[in-house]
Amino acid sequence: MVILMDRLDTPSGQRAVARCTELGRAPYSDMEGGLFRPYLGPSYRATCERLAQWMEQAGMATRMDAAGNLVGRYEGLVPDAPAVLLGSHIDSVRDGGFYDGMLGVILGIETVAHFAHAGKRFPFALEVIGFGDEEGSRFPTGMLTSHAVAGVPQDPDPAMADWAGEATLASALAEFGLDAGHMHRAARRRDGILAYVEAHIEQGPALEAADRALGVVSAIAAQQRYRITLRGMAGHAGTVAMALRRDALAGAADIILAAERIGRAGTDGLVATVGSLDVVPGAANVVPGEVVLSLDVRAGSNAGRDQAVADILQAARHTCAQRGLEMDITLQQDLDATPCDGRLTELMEQAVGSVTGAPAPVLVSGAGHDAMIMAHLAPVSMLFIRCAGGISHNPAESVTPADTDAAFRALITFIGLLERH
Ligand code: HGY
Ligand code: MN
Ligand code: MN
Ligand code: MN
């Protein structure tokens, strides 16, 4: 236990796991029982305050940018030097795990703390960023705030209402003293960032199957997210004959099974998911008149994604024609397949190899990450950490302190390699 205590007093992977666990169990979680940390939600401020404390203990100056991201900066050998950015996202999915996103933010803080403890500075600054919104759990789009930092043309509509319809983006930002109109001003000078480095749990089974603690990401899969609204005719469950029904939920069922069939038949890492379904009016004795369903399609290539989307939407239109349903389709997220930077990936492979003593597995990420957006701004590199059973977006998500410490040492090694190359 003494060793553990010692490890918790100095920067380490063990301490990173302990800090993720502390935040995950914090009483301010927005959902009784499970963890839920939506962008600018009730627990967001307390989470940022705790992260900012750890950043300042690590020798960083901290600020919240115009998009609500938390940023810590550890100056280089000269003031205002361009920065190597380490980070990931603060927010979580509903009833998520403790480590998705947050582990990458805290490992960034631990990495800077290590160099600050050693009094080491570089020709570049080190910055740690906690993105406020990656999951899209509160407003109907994801990676909202890395778009703002990267200055990617996607000026969010301040009138955009959150999923629960309780707040607009403008009002949520105003609660933090931020101005939606300036959100795009969170964008950084293009010369401000040398590289963006994201450590993240793998959220898949590959590293565990290969019995490896760490992996290096070569590319991030293409994805699109849609909101599909089906309108039929609500009616009395006891009196409307089957042949006369325009049942929106039965139509949604056809679409869900079509997405699964097309996904199963695909190659190129194709996956298709209907994760949310809202039925109106949602009463047992009413034929559903309207359904809103999500559609999430991903593949290793843009072409693979686009073909699957076209096939699924064609099946949906056929169902609507057969069942007399109307359909509205809204594209909510559109992310192209993103390669990580070749030189940085090589350095990350070297770092992992020197820490683990074995060549690093290199893999494509099926999960989306803020690195996809930051790649518009700077070269990106991603480090994956094994998670038990590949489980994620689930309270059972877990990592080991040993694997996380290997990741911590790989990040330190990587920054050292960056200085020399
Ligand atoms: O959906 C994703 O890939 C990520 O977890 N936001
Ligand atoms: Mn996630
Ligand atoms: Mn994530
Ligand atoms: Mn975009």
Image (cartoon, rainbow, N blue to C red):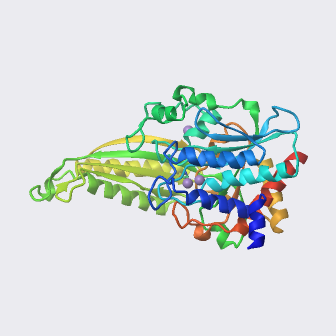
Looking at the rendered image, the quarter that the N terminus falls into is: bottom right
Indicate the quadrant where residue 203 lies.
bottom right
Indicate the quadrant where residue 177 lies.
top right
Tell me where residue 339 appears, x and y as whole percent: 68, 48
Among all residues in the image, which is located at the extreme right?
A: 420
Q: Nearer the viewer, residue 337 or 13?
A: 13
Tell me where residue 255 appears, x and y as whole percent: 35, 55
Q: In the image, 366: left or right of 56?
A: left
Tell me where residue 28 appears, x and y as whole percent: 51, 53
Q: Is the residue 220 above or below the residue 405 in the image?
A: above
Q: In the image, 410: left or right of 209?
A: right
Indicate the quadrant where residue 403 lies.
bottom right
Residue appearing at x 61%, y 59% in the figure:
22
Residue 247 appearing in the image: yes
Q: In the image, 14: left or right of 39?
A: right
Among all residues in the image, which is located at the extreme left?
A: 239
